[in-house]
Amino acid sequence: MRRIALVTLVVDDYDEAIRFYTEALGFRLVEDTPRPDGSRWVVVQPGDQGSALLLARAKGDGQRARVGDQTGGRVGFFLHTDDFARDHARMLGAGVTFLEEPRHEPYGSVAVFQDLYGNRWDLLQPAA
């Protein structure tokens, strides 16, 4: 079996990113391990299984320039849910910025939001 296990998300600050992803989005902190070079191996995951994010602190000007714009302004991340209304309301209450009102499309209920750095995400409950 093959699968995508981790996707790197470049961030400004580990602790700030951990707070956002665990508190505002409800992810769980899977790992936070210091590395010899002063960096940390930080993994957050939205559920108990499946793909996760590796939160990597930007190093150098090139990486810092990519924080918040890793996909050129496009939606680059898709957070699936089994209860759109519940998660949308919880995220709004936690201060997550949605860039549009919820839409109900043939493929499911969806709304675009941004993370603390401006990366665009879809909150999506796929149609049955």
Image (tube, rainbow, N blue to C red):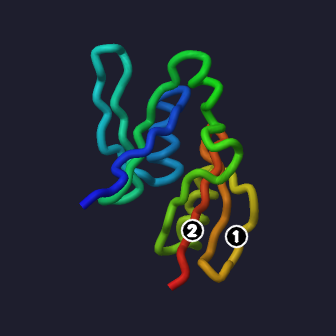
Q: Position of residue 22 (x, y in %)?
A: 44, 47
Q: Quadrant of residue 8?
A: top left
> Residue lying furthest left in this view?
1
10 Å crowding of disc 1: few (<14), some (14-19), many (20+): some
Return the residue at label 2: 124
Who's the residue at 42% across and 52% down the image?
27
- Compared with residue 107, is residue 48 higher up or lower down, i.e. above or below? above
Q: Quadrant of residue 105?
A: bottom right
- Compared with residue 92, is residue 56 higher up or lower down, i.e. above or below? above
Left or right side of 86 for 2: left
Who's the residue at 44% across and 36% down the image?
55
Identify residue type, mark 2: Leu
Element under disc 1: loop
Which one is nearer the viewer's eye here, 47 or 119? 119
Element under disc 2: strand
Left or right side of 81 for 108: right
Q: Quadrant of the N terminus?
A: bottom left
- Looking at the image, tell me whether mark 1 or mark 2 is earlier in sequence order: 1
Q: Position of residue 94 (x, y in %)?
A: 58, 52
Alpha carbons under labels 1 and 2: distance apart: 10 Å
- Compared with residue 83, is residue 19 higher up or lower down, i.e. above or below? above
User: Residue 118, labelled with which disc?
Assistant: none
User: Residue 102, labelled with which disc?
Assistant: 1
Q: Position of residue 3 (x, y in %)?
A: 33, 56
Who's the residue at 37% across and 54% down the image?
51
Q: Quadrant of residue 42?
A: top left
10 Å crowding of disc 2: few (<14), some (14-19), many (20+): many
Q: Position of residue 36 (x, y in %)?
A: 28, 15
Who's the residue at 61% across and 32% down the image?
67
Identify residue type, mark 1: Pro
> Residue lying furthest front in this view?
2
Left or right side of 47 for 126: right
